[in-house]
Image (spheres, rainbow, N blue to C red):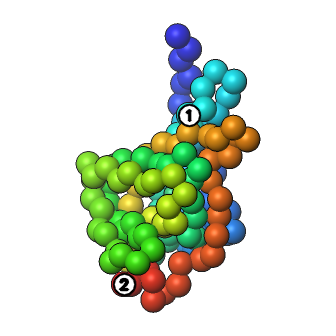
């Protein structure tokens, strides 16, 4: 067993990956021992990821607030604490807060053979965000 006391610094989400202010606390990065990647991600109202894919898929567990998750060709899905979202490998999607509420989720991904967990695409437009 290895215990890590709460420490470190919350990271801010890079502008290439997110629209609006997003804060990320890393839990685990892929290593030789495990391909698992895990982070707790907090979105301020209106903030969201850009469109992206995960080579091995992704599981989201909503911990706070009210958010949205969007995928190509479907209406935006509202998400709330306790909800679990499964994203398929290669599925283009985005996730974020609603315009008026914060949203936080735990994000779980597995790295592929090259160590990649995500491929970032284009920003989510206002029209896509409000659909
Ligand atoms: Mn995702």
> 58 above or below 16?
above
Identify the disc placed on residue 62.
none
For residue 84, above or below residue 66: above
Left or right of 91 on screen, residue 122: right
- The residue pinned by badge 2 equals 131
Q: How many marks?
A: 2
Extreme residue toward the top, this view: 1
Residue that sits furthest to the right in the current view: 114
Left of 83 or right of it: where is 28? right
46 is higher (above) or lower (below) than 33: below
| Front position in the image: 9 or 74 | 74
Q: Residues within 10 Å of mark 1 (few under 14, many from 20)?
A: some
* Residue 77 at x, y percent in the picture: 31, 69
Q: Which residue corresponds to the image point at 45% horizontal and 53% vertical from the top-left?
A: 88
Q: Earlier in the sequence, mark 2 or mark 1?
A: 1
Looking at the picture, tell me which residue is in the foreground, 118 or 97: 118
Residue 92: where, in percent of width, then height? 52, 66
Residue 8, can we see it?
no
Residue 3 visible in rendering: yes
Residue 74 in the image: above or below residue 87: below
- The spot of residue 114 in percent (x, y) is 73, 41
Residue 23 x %, y %: 55, 56
Q: Which residue is mark 1?
A: 36
Q: Residue at x 56, y 70 (%)?
A: 51
Name the residue at 27% across, 59% down. Answer: 80
């Amino acid at each position: 067993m290895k215990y890590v006391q709460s420490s470190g610094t919350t990271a801010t989400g890079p502008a290439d990956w997110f629209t609006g202010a997003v804060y990320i606390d890393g839990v685990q990065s892929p290593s030789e021992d495990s391909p698992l990647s895990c982070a707790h991600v907090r979105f301020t109202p209106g903030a969201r990821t850009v469109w992206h894919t995960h080579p091995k898929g992704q599981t989201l567990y909503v911990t706070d607030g009210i958010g949205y998750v969007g995928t190509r060709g479907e209406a935006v899905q509202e998400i709330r604490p306790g909800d679990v979202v499964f994203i398929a490998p290669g599925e283009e999607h985005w996730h974020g807060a609603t315009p008026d509420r914060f949203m936080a989720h735990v994000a779980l991904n597995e790295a592929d053979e090259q160590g990649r967990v995500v491929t970032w695409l284009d920003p989510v437009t206002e029209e896509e965000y409000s659909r």
